[in-house]
Amino acid sequence: MKRLTLVLLIAGWSAAGFAQTSGKPAAAESKSEGERSGLEAWKWANFLILAGGLGYLIRKNAGPFFAARGKKIQQDMLDAQEMRADAERRAADVDRRLANLEKEIASLKAESQAEAKAETERSMQHTASEIAKIRAHAEREIVAAGKAARMDLKRYSAELAVQLAEQKISAHMTGEAQDNLVQGFVHDLKHPAS
């Protein structure tokens, strides 16, 4: 703050000196050559003081400013290099993945074919198991149907035998034979065999 005040004071003093020299009437211009060179010297002195003050301020403030700016630019360059290296790593990773893509596709195809083959085998085993179960069930049903058919056949043949026996008995049974049978039955009832 002090330096800024000093610079403004010097700049104001220099401007005031310049105004004094330029604000004189035309009669003063006719002064001697010595006065003119003295005024000229003051102008140059004011200019040098102003230029020196400005140079000092510029050198004092511009150095750190440009150093900070240079550091910022260097940091930005380092960040950009890191980002570029990261992007190149990612690109290399993508290229590597693309190069391995065919291998991965082939691996996936082989894996899916193996799974399909295994699934087909499991399906065939399951189908064979189901066929065996159905065959065993059908055989049991056939055996049961055979037993039922044999029983029906026995029952039918027994019915036929009874009908045939009835027909033979009816054919041979006369009234006299019936009376003999009834009397024999009654006699057996009266005199049981002991």
Image (cartoon, grey):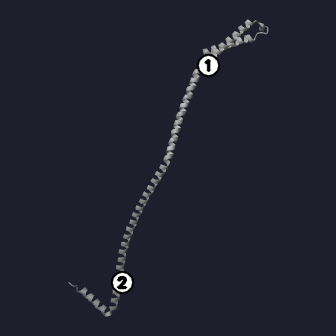
In the image, farthest residue toward the right: 27
Q: Answer with the quarter of the image where residue 73 lies.
A: top right
Residue 134 position within the rendered picture, expressed as x and y whole percent measured from the top left: 40, 67
Q: Amino acid at mark 2?
A: Leu
Residue at left 40%, top 66%? 131
Residue at left 60%, top 21%? 62
Residue 72 position within the rendered picture, expressed as x and y whole percent measured from the top left: 56, 27
Residue 109 in view of the camera: yes
Quadrant location, the C terminus? bottom left
Count of number-bearing discs: 2
Instruction: Name the residue beneath numbered marker 2.
Output: 160
The residue tagged with tag 2: helix, strand or loop? helix
How many other residues sit within 10 Å of disc 2, few (<14), some (14-19) or many (≥20)? few
**Marks 2 and 1, how far apart at CA:** 141 Å
Residue 9 in view of the camera: no
Instruction: Name the residue beneath numbered marker 1.
Output: 58
Which numbered disc, 2 or 1, marks the residue that appears first in the sequence? 1
Residue at left 73%, top 12%? 19
